[in-house]
Amino acid sequence: ERNIYRSFRGRDVRRIEVVSFMRLANSIFRRYGGLAGEYADASDKTILMSLALDQLKDALKVYGKTSNISLTRSMLEAVDEFKTWGIVPQQLEQAAGQLSDGLLKDKLSELSMIYSAYEGILGRLYLDPLDDIARAGRILETHPYFAGKALFIDEFDGFTANEAGILRAALRQ
């Protein structure tokens, strides 16, 4: 931000907004809606994942053998990673469906079930900040947030699937 402001030396600085993808999502929500709701914190997520695992314990062959805090944390880490890269439960199930019977197929299928159950519980009660960029991307499909704006991208090594979705929407506008 400082570099941008120094470069412009005060000219039109009020028209410049330097944002991360999370701040951009928040700006989109403020303009078009999407801020209503309470965000889940780490404790909330742990409790909800534990509930999801408990609901599925009889259906799980691989992950049902153990029910403890380390499994809960591992599943939360997996879901966080899936969300970061734009992977939804249906994709895991589709991938499992393409495999012949075996441990990998069972794991992917169970991950899909766990992720789906967790999302169902979470979605009824809370918002997840990890969903904000994807939610903002869906809003951009029908709202011209970037119309008439110049967009400059700097200091990124790469983009997640959700971030790339935001950029595709920006380029279309």
Image: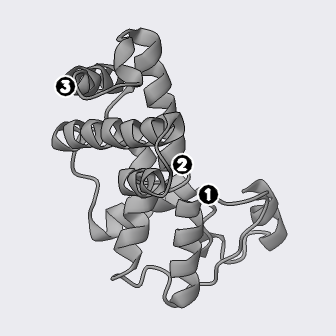
- Alpha-carbon distance for marks 2 and 3? 25 Å
Q: Where residue 17 appears, x then y in whole percent? A: 59, 66
Q: Position of residue 143 (x, y in %)?
A: 35, 82
The reply, left or right, for residue 56 in relation to residue 4 is left
Q: Position of residue 148 (x, y in %)?
A: 52, 90
Dot 1 or dot 2: first in sequence order is 2
Q: Residue beneath label 3, please? A: 55
Q: Circle 2 is placed at which residue position?
A: 84
Q: Nearer the viewer, mark 1 or mark 3?
A: 3
Residue drawn at point x = 20 percent, y = 36 percent = 121
At x 16%, y 42%, the residue is 124
Residue 59 visible somewhere in the drawing = yes
- Classify mark 1: residues with Cα within 10 Å, few (<14), some (14-19) or many (20+): few
Which element type, helix, strand or loop, lies under badge 3? Answer: helix
Q: Secondary structure at mark 1?
A: loop
Q: Residues within 10 Å of mark 3 (few under 14, many from 20)?
A: some
Q: Earlier in the sequence, mark 2 or mark 3?
A: 3
Q: Looking at the image, which residue is at 43% across and 60% down?
A: 134
The kind of residue tagged 1 is Thr
Say which residue label 1 marks: 160
Q: Amino acid at mark 2?
A: Thr
Residue 7, image quadrant: bottom right
Q: Are marks 1 and 2 in contact (CB under 8 Å)?
A: yes
2 vs 3, front mark: 3
**Is residue 26 shown to the viewer in this render?**
no
Give the number of marks. Answer: 3
Q: Kindly state the secondary structure of the residue where label 2 is placed.
A: helix
Provide residue 67's location: percent of width, then percent of height.
35, 11
Mark 1 and mark 2: Cα distance apart in space:
7 Å
Q: Answer above or below: position of 92 versus 124.
A: below
Q: 66 or 52, which is in the foreground?
A: 66
